[in-house]
Image: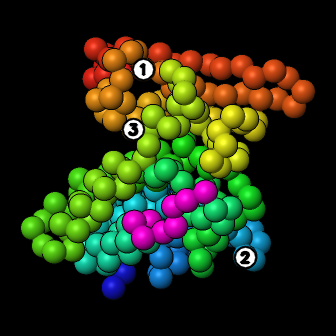
Amino acid sequence: MILHAPTAKHDTTEVAILAAIQRESFGYFLHETNPANGLVIDKTCAADWPASIAAVGLALAAYPVGVERAFLERDEAVMRTLTTLRFFARSSQGPEPNATGYKGFYYHFLDMQTGARAWQCELSTIDTALLLAGMLAAGAYFDRNTPDEREIRTLADGLYARADWQWAQNGGATVTLKVTDCPNVELLGAVSVTVGAAWLTICITLPELMLKLPSPLYAAVIVCPPGASKETLKLAVAPDKATGLP
């Protein structure tokens, strides 16, 4: 059962406006999610548009907010979260062109019904990081000692651990943000990401890489404009500063 916070018709205070915006924004995840697998459509501008794994990560992070704001009941949030995590845990991981992912990472866009790769899109470490961040948020929030909430924590931890960040380094000291041809990581397509997205990738990868690599850690944004040579912007993070990112 979905709960809706009351709104006064003529209340135009800042608090009421912000509450209404939050409630209506949250409604996107309630109404644009496939209840069978938890996938969230990237946008609603056309029929048969695919899901975005980044949108799924946002939904997973939003469900706890919805519970706290009384937009939906905890039991429904648990079932939505479990449906999503179970789908990704059981989804196809392999070099096949229509798989859901590879090496613990996922394709940016997935078919809303089957979860298969859409549009021959890229295997995206940055969008996988957004997805994993949502999973970890869910695992942290659903902390009760019930079978369903224990399963959420187990699945979230397992999916996070499955991502092979060393493979994503492509033999170097950097983590690539997008892979166009899987499992061939040699050539990358044009990439444009925000600094915030790059830092999120660093935060997600740090714990895994710090356990396995003796050298300083880097996240790389690969920029390949058409006709230009590859350039790498490295955001360096020393291991001893892992808890104090600049």
Q: Quadrant of residue 176?
A: top right
Q: In the image, which residues are magenta? A: 88-95
Say which amino acid is labelled 3.
Ile
Q: Which residue is mark 3?
A: 204
Q: CA distance from mark 2 to mark 3?
A: 31 Å
Q: CA distance from mark 3 to mark 1?
A: 12 Å
Where is residue 90 drawn, in percent x and y?
42, 70
Q: Secondary structure at mark 1?
A: strand
Q: Which numbered disc flags the more N-terminal residue, 2 or 3?
A: 2
Q: Residues within 10 Å of mark 1 (few under 14, many from 20)?
A: many
Question: Can residue 6 be seen by looking at this rendering?
Answer: no
- Classify 191 as above or below 25: above
Q: Which residue is mark 2?
A: 48
Q: Which mark is residue 217?
A: 1
Q: Residues within 10 Å of mark 2 (few under 14, many from 20)?
A: few
Q: CA distance from mark 1 to mark 2?
A: 40 Å
Residue 93 belongs to magenta span: yes
Q: Residues within 10 Å of mark 3 (few under 14, many from 20)?
A: some
Say which amino acid is labelled 2.
Asp
Residue shown at 44% from the left, 65% from the top: 88
The residue nearer to you, when weighing 159 against 30, is 159
Residue shown at 57% from the left, 71% from the top: 115
Residue shown at 75% from the left, 68% from the top: 45
Where is residue 166 drawn, in percent x and y?
45, 34
Q: Secondary structure at mark 3?
A: helix
Q: Which numbered disc flags the more N-terminal residue, 3 or 1?
A: 3
Which is closer to the viewer, label 1 or label 2? 1
Q: Quadrant of residue 211?
A: top left
